[in-house]
Amino acid sequence: MKKLNRRKHVFFMILLALIPIRIEIVQVRCESVEFKVNRVVWGDNIDNPIKAYPGDSEVPLTVEVQNLSSDKTIKGVSATLNLEPLH
């Protein structure tokens, strides 16, 4: 009985290896989308901001943006905030 199960297992593995499988990963990038910044608050919750003081660190900054493009969807937005000292 074990030989029969083993043969079935080997047969299915060979069968799976012979079936052509095509996996395509498509990354779509849009160079520019019109959007508006609605609110910026310290903290993780846009509706419940926290206070941040000079010298604080590791305080999240939440930025709420609104997509103004009716024909484009924004997903997985990431941004980098570059700060320079005031002179």
Image: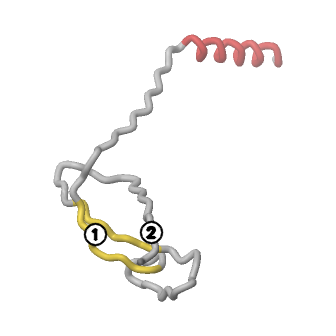
Pick the quarter of the image with the N terminus.
top right
Q: How many marks?
A: 2
Q: Looking at the picture, which amino acid does disc 2 mark?
A: Leu
**Is 82 above or below relative to 24?**
below
Amino acid carrying mark 1 in the image? Val
* Residue at 82% from the left image edge and 18% from the top image edge: 2
**Which residue is nearer to you in this view: 75 or 56?**
56
In the rendered image, residue 57, in percent from the top left (x then y), is placed at 58, 78
Describe the element under mark 2 as helix, strand or loop. Answer: loop
Q: Nearer the viewer, residue 18 or 12?
A: 18
Residue 28 placement: quadrant: top left
Looking at the image, which residue is at 43% across and 64% down?
81
Which residue carries the number 1 mark? 37
Q: Where is residue 86 shown, x and y percent of the image?
A: 42, 77
In the picture of the structure, the residue carrying the numbered disc 2 is 83
Q: Reading the chain from its start, which is encountered first: label 2 or label 1? A: 1
Q: Position of residue 58 (x, y in %)?
A: 58, 75
Q: Nearer the viewer, residue 41 or 20?
A: 41
Task: Single out the mark in the foreground, 2 or 1.
Answer: 2
The image quadrant of residue 27 is: top left
Q: Disc 2 to disc 1, how far (Cα)?
A: 18 Å
